[in-house]
Amino acid sequence: MLSSMPNEFLFFNIYPMNFKKNITVIVGENGVGKSTLLVTIAIKFGCPAEGGARNFNFKTEDTHFQSVEHIRLIKSGKRISDLFFYRSEAYYNFLTEMRKLDAEEFGGAKINSYYGGKDLLLLSHGESMKALYEHRLKPNSLYIFDEPEASLSVDNLINLIRKINQLSLKGTQFIIATHSPLLMAIPDADLIELDKKFHRRIKL
């Protein structure tokens, strides 16, 4: 798991980036590399580039990021219970793959049972995201969220923030890229501004 202690996690071939706290919020202008950063971390942990759980193997495009070849990931030895990468722009692709797998006769529980047991493609984007954070998130885990606010109402975003705070106190680590002022204002989060040539910790 990415440790909440300093110097346990370094990112980027250009400069080291330390993730010091259980909640890290990454901000910056469009095109500076926030999504690329999160996708690269997620791929290194075994998640699909389009989002999903570790070892959930699917792709609709042959997505490739050169940064994956050059990244050096240093992590603590703490074992995590769960890992998930949410990518708002590709969440539909993940849900489509889930439905496809659940339709096959493998035996055992369906994948959507971990998300409340509903066919999430029949829900709105916001409702399916709500099912994710209400049912899927666990203590002592790692969650990587790229613009989780994209589909959520203000009330549901506040509920997500409440869930993030609760789980961070139970050992779960969140890395979040966002443009949302609400997510930027999460108490005790590490707020990092990303630019094409630098990163820096900031305070609101």
Image (spheres, rainbow, N blue to C red):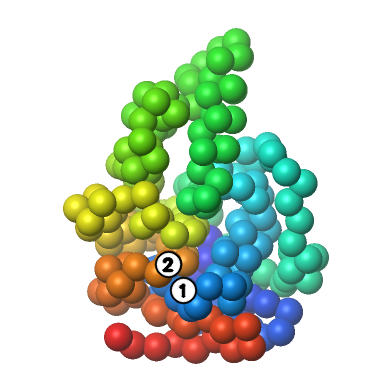
Q: Helix, strand, or loop for circle 2?
A: loop
The residue that disc 1 covers is: 26
Q: Which residue matches tag 2?
A: 178
Residue at 49% x, 89% y is: 200
Q: Nearer the viewer, mark 1 or mark 2?
A: 2
**101 or 81: nearer the viewer:** 101
Amino acid type shown at disc 2: Thr
Residue 196 x/y as whole percent:
62, 83
In primary-sequence order, the first of circles 1 and 2 is 1
Could you tell me residue 31's position as x and y percent?
A: 59, 73
> Residue 107: where, in percent of width, then height?
56, 12
Q: Which image quadrant: the C terminus?
A: bottom left
Nearer to us in this view, 95 or 1: 95
The reply to whether discs 1 and 2 touch (Cβ–Cβ < 8 Å) is: yes
Q: Residues within 10 Å of mark 1 (few under 14, many from 20)?
A: many
Q: Residue at x 44, y 60 (%)?
A: 147
**Mark 1 secondary-structure assignment:** strand
